[in-house]
Image (spheres, rainbow, N blue to C red):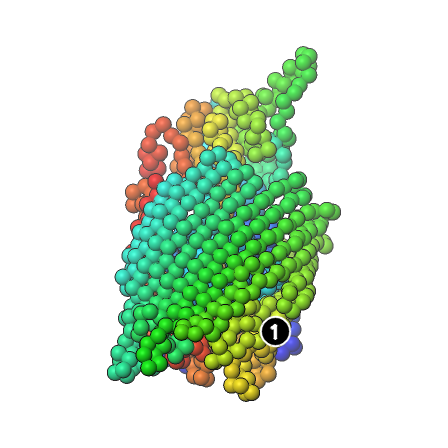
Amino acid sequence: MKTYIIKILAAVIMFATVDFRNICLAEPTNGKSAAVQAHKEDVKAAFLYNFVQFTDWPADKLSEPNTITIGLLGEYRFGNTFDPVQNKTVKDKRLNIKNLGTFRKSFPQDDAGKLELANYIEQLRKCHVLFICDSERENYNEILNAVKGYGVLTVGETADFLDFNGIITFIPGTEKPVFEINQKVCEQEGMKISSKVLRLARKVIADKDPDADKNK
Amino acid sequence: MHTKKSSAGKIAIFIVAILLALGTLCFAEQSEANAPQDLFAMPIEDLAEQSYTVYGASKYEQKTSEAPAFVTIITADEIRKYGYKTLADVIESVPEFFITYDRNYHYIGVRGFRRPGDYDTRILILLNGHRLNDNVYDSVSTGTTFPVDIDLIEKVEVIRGPGSSLYGSNAFLAVVNVITKNAKTLEGVEVSGEVASFDTMKERVSYGKNFDESHNLLVSATSYKSSGPTLHFKEFDTPATHNGNVSNDDDQFYNLFLNATVGEFTFLATYLPREKGIPTAPYDTYFGDSRTKTNDDMAIMGLEYKHDFTDDFAVRGRVSYHHYDYDGAFVYDDSGLYVNKDNARGRWWESELQFIAKPIENHKLTWGIEDQYNTTQDQKNWDSAVYLDDKRHSNNWGVYIQDEWKIFDKWTFVGGVRHDEYGTFGGTTNPRLALIYQHSDATTVKLLYGQAFRAPNVYELYYNDGDYTMKAADSLNPETIQTYEAVLEQKLNKNLGATVSAFHYEMKDVLDQYLDPADNLLVFRNLKEVKANGITGALTGRWENGLKGRASYTFVEARDGQTDAILVSSPKQLAKFNVIYPVIQNNLFAGLEVLYTSKAKTLTNNYADDFWITNLTLTYENIVKGLELSASVYNLFDVHYGYPSGAEHRQDIIEQDGTSFRIKLTYRF
């Protein structure tokens, strides 16, 4: 019996080493797409990438000719997840994934410090999508006030993010990605999220009936 | 029963071959599209369907491709769209598994092994990580006795192979981790009502509330009642026993469920008492008396604590209290009818402390200690006299450690070992070794070896019915199993994935009942050896338009180690085909399931015929916002089939239901 199983093992290993993909005439695959599962960070990263594609910004927000920026604020957990899309062309612009580190609160009180602060805030305001890690929960008010009125699609990952006028949040502790959208704030900021994304949200906070949008 | 049995097996192979061929074709066609093959390229709808990870294989979250086992995950979405009524239905759809039902309890068979009369002792079932197997019979029945309503299950992780190196006893052939919903996945009020064949009604109301980020609550109550069909047993077809017709197949339960999170603590409580009439007249009871029934009461209160000190160091603590009452009433005719009562009382505490750390680069370490303190393990049998009044309590504990070592870029080694100590037989140590080769994100090969054990339970050790038919064993050794397995996981394209798993296992000291010639009484002994070889091919697919499905074929030969005979109740072939088809995008779904089980030997060396079962469910979502209607037909073609029964039954084969229906309405607001 043991020889029987050893033969099966050998066959399986050979099968694998000969490279199953060639036998099956396939393109080499290098992704996780057929899997029904993935690490949370990878999925969130992919969602952020999709949010760029399915959001319309006001024309002036897209005035800078070359780049669309996804800013990542807070403890960086993404490793090299974003490598496949860094510098990729999206909406005819170069996608720039920018790790902004943890939110910086204290700046020197001198003029140089003030300039530094202004530059720092400017950097946040320039983002098209700003992902704010749960590690920044204590700073929601400061961060969200800083980018208010600058057409930044803010994305969080705590259940109360929308209460602080954040726009999209991933609900933690779920087995699948679950997110909610504050369309009201989104519209105030002059952005428009595609119905394709709205339809997938668990909850959409809107001034008007959210279903009205769905039928478009 | 009348099927074309010789040809059906060939048909099964033929159909699976066609499916595999079709899969390959689709895949060849798809590859011309030349789509980028990663999450970034995936349609956002599919992204939203990504189920994160598996927990049960290593006691921490990991991708199934990284888990040291062949893993299948079934989600709440599939449970709804395939119209599954119980956890047993879910498990039956999983490759390598089969279910039998004796019209009282459902039993799980896997990889060709199921011993008739055994109460699922060789599969460990977890509820949110808390072990459920009771402390008298070692069982968790997965039919209507399962302690959580199927509607409250978020996902089911099925991890094949031995898991004793992490979990100790019962993790012998597989570990099934059931993860319930919480307020994050069920927010607001949800009411659900269903009516089904055989006067079956089920109602449920659930309420989930998120107070803030770390405080939430889900409560739910369910009531279920079924009169059951009128059955005919040819073994009892005499005028004295109503010509074999009987109608006491009634089944009812209710379920109270609570899940709350307060900061880093999660509290779970569930209670499910179930009463079932037994129509089959087992143990030579009087046929057709509605007083012959069983009551199973299971309650669990569990508290879990999770704290991450840093990204590289985390602690998990669990403590749970379990309550299990079994009350059997059996009507006998001995110059007048009388009721014999058979009871079991189980009360126990379970606790575990676990650490997860990445002490040095490329190593992920988990270690922990687990204790089970059995305050009550009592068995009683009586009518006019008391035949058994056995009171026990015991303690057992285990320590474990596992290292996931990334040796090179593509090679991972997983080594784990656990030592358990029991008052009854002493200690046992069980290792697991896995070598995982990730050739690319598309191709993974796993070579797995594991040992597992199952401790003898108090039923096997101490049950006797006053030396009428059974006597107590008093001293038994644990059963052991060694499993060798090779798994190939191959993503064929962005839509299809294939898995091939080949396994060999050897069981020793398997507990079985033995008729002692000295006194003509049955007694449990470490008697049997079992050897099995098997192979499974499985395909899973999902497409942009919402179409998704899975197909699998298993061939297994499980033999008695001494006689080389194929085991009783061990079908050699299983084929499963499941597909969810979006009839109207985002609204109407058709869930089709076709299950094939080949013939299986019975205790009298006859065969239960092979059979194909087809189930179809239509689900209409958002008729108005939050309202969902589903309609199911089970056993669509009214196939007559049955399962090999245990020795307690006069029936050699217990016949199952023909076509039945269910309509279910759910409204969330």
**Would residue B648 be seen by someone viewing this image from the given angle?**
yes
What residue is rendered at 60% in x and 51% in y?
A: B60
Reply above or below: B363 against A198: below
Which residue of the protein is positioned furthest toward the front in this rendering?
A: B385
What residue is rendered at 59% in x and 21% in y?
A: A121
Name the spot of residue B340 as percent of width and height, x first. Answer: 40, 72
Name the spot of residue A152 as percent of width and height, x first. Answer: 51, 27
Question: Could you say which quadrant of the image residue B454 lies in?
Answer: bottom right
Reply above or below: B630 against B622: below
Name the quarter where the C terminus of chain A is drawn: top left
Name the spot of residue B484 as percent of width and height, x first. Answer: 63, 69
What residue is rendered at 53% in x and 24% in y?
A: A141
Which residue of the protein is positioned furthest toward the right in this rendering?
A: B360
Question: Could you say which quadrant of the image residue B447 lies in?
Answer: bottom right
Chain at tag 1? B
Q: Name the residue under label 1.
A: B476
What residue is rendered at 40% in x and 53% in y?
A: B255
Between residues B456 and B538, which one lies in front from this camera angle?
A: B456
**Would residue B612 be seen by someone viewing this image from the given angle?**
no
Between residues B395 and B318, which one lies in front from this camera angle?
A: B395
Name the quarter where the N terminus of chain A is drawn: bottom right
**Tag 1, which secondary structure?**
loop
Name the spot of residue B420 as percent of width and height, x first. Answer: 66, 62
Please rate how many residues cluster around mark 1, counting C-alpha atoms within 10 Å: few if below 14, some from 14 to 19, many from 20: some
Reply above or below: A192 against B337: above
Q: Is residue A10 left or right of residue B35?
A: right
Q: Is residue B656 left or right of residue A59?
A: left
Residue type, numbered disc 1 = Leu
Q: In this view, does A195 lie to the left or right of B513?
A: left
Which residue of the protein is positioned furthest toward the top in this rendering?
A: A111
